[in-house]
Image: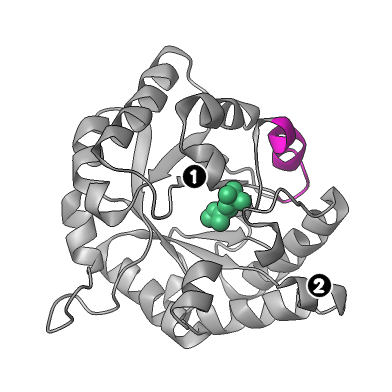
Amino acid sequence: MATVRKLVAGNWKMNGLSDQIVEAVKVAESLAQTPAGVRVAICPPNILVHRIAERLARTVVEVGAQDLHCEAAGAFTGDTSGEMLRDAGARLVIIGHSERRSHHREDDAAVSAKVGAALRAGLEPIVCVGESLEERRSGQALQVVESQLAGSLPDSLDGRSFVIAYEPVWAIGTGLTPTLAEIEEVHRAIRRVLVARFSNGAARPILYGGSVKASNAAEILNAAEVGGALVGGASLKATDFLPIVRAGG
Ligand code: 13P
């Protein structure tokens, strides 16, 4: 496998008012003193992207968004385009998170259109896939993930920077994690799909997400084909997030 710098990204989800900005600043200040050798990103709610991007400019911490609309502009009340997020300072965007797939009924086609929109806007997409507990128990995890990848990744990704995040739905916010062997099995399957479809498929990071915390980060981040982590709850406080970042270095 080609060596790629690991990416540890924090997904704040719908958490954080103005007083949460200081946590992002603390992460950046700590990493300035101790370079971790990993790529680090924080994805706050879209409303905080601009203010955090301004505070993190000229630091090693990148800012990402959590979703975007597939059009650049228009009559889409309440939506935010990739171009707007990029203009606000985002460099990455999470797309197809299971919470969007379930609460907003986003299917693979919608995710694929959003990935195309992210590329058009100059944002690096973090495309999420992952099976439900029922699908895992019935032995369909690989099949579900492969099918999500087939439908969610447009051909236009070829040669572009993008990230895949494997997030088993049942591991999100539950404290449960798959075994390392289960994580590696899915990550290897994702790698096979990427290599078969994209000229740069061997070099794109595949993140694991779902109940990553300081105590399990090192073993997960060192597992085969794991190129980083997408961290939810444990990314909200710098004191929880920084040990995870350092575990990737
Ligand atoms: P938790 O780390 O809170 O389980 O959330 C994972 C996740 O959904 C990140 O996108």
Amino acid marked by disc 1: Ala
Magenta span: chief secondary structure: helix
Q: Quadrant of the C terminus?
A: top right
Residue 192 x %, y %: 72, 68
Say which residue label 2 marks. Answer: 136
Residue extending farthest left: 74
- Asked which quadrant contains residue 142, the reply is bottom right
Given residues 192 and 80, the one toward you in this image is: 80
**Point 22% across, 69% down: residue:** 81
Q: Give the numbered dot on residue 158.
A: none
Asked if residue 6 is positioned above or below residue 27 in the image, the reply reads below
Q: Determine which quarter of the picture holds residue 66.
A: bottom left
For label 1, the SS is: strand
Q: Residues within 10 Å of mark 2 (few under 14, many from 20)?
A: some
Residue matched to label 1: 9
Which residues are the magenta region? 215-225
Q: Is residue 52 above or below residue 44?
A: above
Q: Is residue 56 above or below residue 146?
A: above
The answer to if 246 sits in the magenta stretch is: no
Residue 126 in percent (x, y) is at: 47, 60
Residue shown at the point (43%, 48%) measured from the top left:
12
| Residue 209 percent across, percent down from the top left | 62, 53
Q: Are marks 1 and 2 in contact (CB under 8 Å)?
A: no
Q: Which residue lies at the image location 59% right of the left edge and 25% below the top edge?
A: 243
Can the viewer see residue 96 in this picture?
no
Of the two numbered discs 1 and 2 on the same chain, state the one appearing first in sequence: 1
Name the residue at the top extreme.
33
Residue 91 placement, left or right of 133: left
Residue lying at 64% horizontally and 60% vertically, measured from the top left: 167
The amino acid type of the residue labelled 2 equals Arg
Residue 212 rendering spot, x and y as whole percentages: 65, 43
- Camera-nearest label, 1 or 2: 2
